[in-house]
Image (cartoon, rainbow, N blue to C red):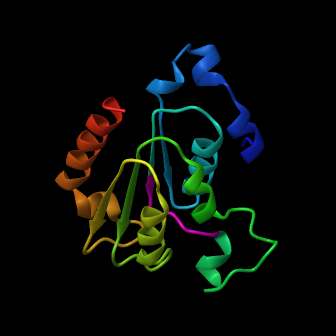
Amino acid sequence: MPSRKDFLSNPYLTEDLKIKPEQIIVFGRSVGGGSAIDLAARKPIAGLIIESTFTSAFRVVVPFPILPFDKFNNLEKIKKVKVPVLVMHGKLDDIVPFEHGEKLFAAVTTPKLYLWVEDANHNDFFEVAQEKYGQKLREFAELVSKN
């Protein structure tokens, strides 16, 4: 399995497949949202989608900051993202509390959308969201195309 560093430095899409960065939308779910935010803050892309993502790795366990140990401070990194962002989170998430999604959304400084799903937990978001999920992705693609 590739390391986080290898993943974030891999030019497969842009160099091997010759896909332009402005055609790439990065998606991260749960812990993967941290890597997606980090990539979007550092590399040129078209858009960022995060689902059920934490504000900080430590904030999932401890409700206050533990500095300087937090290498995954998504709340600070998302402020550096320069492309449209879609934040999705289930209101019943018992692994990454819903407030993490709200805080990440509030920190975004670029055009943004959200999808909050009332009855969705951490691992059933897609199933519960159903049509709303596809509808929001289409809406986000439209937003990205305008930027």
Residue 23: x and y, percent? 44, 25
Left/right of residue 133 with respect to residue 144 in the rendered view: left
In this rendering, does residue 24 appear at all? Answer: yes
52 part of magenta stretch = yes
Q: Farthest front residue?
A: 109
Which residue is located at x 56 percent, y 13 percent?
A: 18
Dividing the picture into quarters, in which one does residue 102 lie? Answer: bottom left
In this rendering, does residue 3 appear at all? Answer: no
Q: Quadrant of the N terminus?
A: top right
Main SS, magenta residues: loop
Foreground pick, 49 / 129: 49
Dividing the picture into quarters, in which one does residue 25 lie? Answer: top left
Foreground pick, 4 / 47: 47
Foreground pick, 40 / 29: 40
Q: Quadrant of the C terminus?
A: top left
126 part of magenta stretch = no
Left/right of residue 66 with respect to residue 15 in the rendered view: right
Can you say whether 139 is above or below 46 in the image?
below
Which residue is located at x 58 percent, y 60 percent?
A: 31
Left/right of residue 47 with respect to residue 5 in the rendered view: left
Q: Farthest right residue?
A: 68
Residue 91: x and y, percent? 33, 76
Residue 110: x and y, percent? 43, 48
Which residue is located at x 58 percent, y 32 percent?
A: 44
Can you say whether 121 is above or below 114 in the image?
below
Which residue is located at x 56 percent, y 68 percent?
A: 55
Residue 72: x and y, percent? 68, 62
Q: Which residues are magenta?
A: 50-56
Dividing the picture into quarters, in which one does residue 67 lie? Answer: bottom right
